[in-house]
């Protein structure tokens, strides 16, 4: 006697590939040169002194224009004026002054080869992020999409952007988010997800640990194993 009754199709397990979300700046790419140049341009445009190195580091990652207000202490109108000036330079050319961190291409290749669905979730405008990913030749790698803030402010902050990626993925399994700053951890936690921190970006071990990162890795080559451990 067969295990399957006559006229009834056998049950089949359906594999749903897990989603892994990646921050962009400080996680996939070193975008410091273009962002710092654009911040300096924005400060000059409103008559502010050049930010200190510590301020410049703190400004890379959090969403603008809120970061201008929080870190440089400017008021709302000044922050908005800085945002306009920032985009003048960044959108024209500075956003392409980026480089993939050593080992990232190989890590992404390993993740996609084992079946993970990769997505980008960044606090920068999605239109910029999409152009940067295309410039780097990685559009096809991120089958889960490139998600970012909206220029008009209707989508803002890491939690909102993570929500966009989750909505596209549907009800499939989700491993979590990979990022380098505390707001990456907070954005993942807002959806009940873990965040795997990376130490090579702009935050560092202490910031990520204090925010509650599930773990922190020091090399891109460690990402596949760390994400597998996170999934389990």
Image: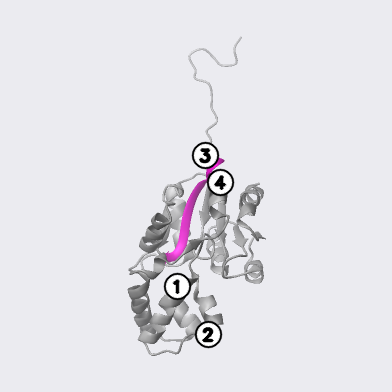
Pointer 4 or 2: first along the chain? 2
Please tell me the numbered disc located at residue 35. Answer: 1
- Tag 1: Cα neighbours inside 10 Å, few (<14), some, or many (≥20)? many
Instruction: Give percent across and percent down for residue 226.
Output: 65, 52
Instruction: Please identify the quarter of the rendering in which residue 132 is found.
Output: bottom left
Pointer 4 or 3: first along the chain? 3
Task: Name the residue tied to disc 2.
Answer: 52
Task: Name the residue tied to disc 3.
Answer: 16
Mark 1 in CB contact with mark 4 (< 8 angstroms): no
Spatial CA span between label 2 and label 1: 14 Å
**What residue span does the magenta drawing correspond to?**
110-124
Residue at the spot x=34%, y=67% of the render?
151
- Tag 2: Cα neighbours inside 10 Å, few (<14), some, or many (≥20)? few
Closest to the camera, between mark 3 and mark 2, is: 2
For label 4, the SS is helix
Pointer 1 or 3: first along the chain? 3
Spatial CA span between label 4 and label 3: 15 Å
Spatial CA span between label 3 and label 2: 47 Å
- Can residue 123 be seen here? The reply is yes
Q: In the image, is residue 83 above or below residue 159?
A: below
Residue at the spot x=39%, y=86% of the render?
44
């Amino acid at each position: 006697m067969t295990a399957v009754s006559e006229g009834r199709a056998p049950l089949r397990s359906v594999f749903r590939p897990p989603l892994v979300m990646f921050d962009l700046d400080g996680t996939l790419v070193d975008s410091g040169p273009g962002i710092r140049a654009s911040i300096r341009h924005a400060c000059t445009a409103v008559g502010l002194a050049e930010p200190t190195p510590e301020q410049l580091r703190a400004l890379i990652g959090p969403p603008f224009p809120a970061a201008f207000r929080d870190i440089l202490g400017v008021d709302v109108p000044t922050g908005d004026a800085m945002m306009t000036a920032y985009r003048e330079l960044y959108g024209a050319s500075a956003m392409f002054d980026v480089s993939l961190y050593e080992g990232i291409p190989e890590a992404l290749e390993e993740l996609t080869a084992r079946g993970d669905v990769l997505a980008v979730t960044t606090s920068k405008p999605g239109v910029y992020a999409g152009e940067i990913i295309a410039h780097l030749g990685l559009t096809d790698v991120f089958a889960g999409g490139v998600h970012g803030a909206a220029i008009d402010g209707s989508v803002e902050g890491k939690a909102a952007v993570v929500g966009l990626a989750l909505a596209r993925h549907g009800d499939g399994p989700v491993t979590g988010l990979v990022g380098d700053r505390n707001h990456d951890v907070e954005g993942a936690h807002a959806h009940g997800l873990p965040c795997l921190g990376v130490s090579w970006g702009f935050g560092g071990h202490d910031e990520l640990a204090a925010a509650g990162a599930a773990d922190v890795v020091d090399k891109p080559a460690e990402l596949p194993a760390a994400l597998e451990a996170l999934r389990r």
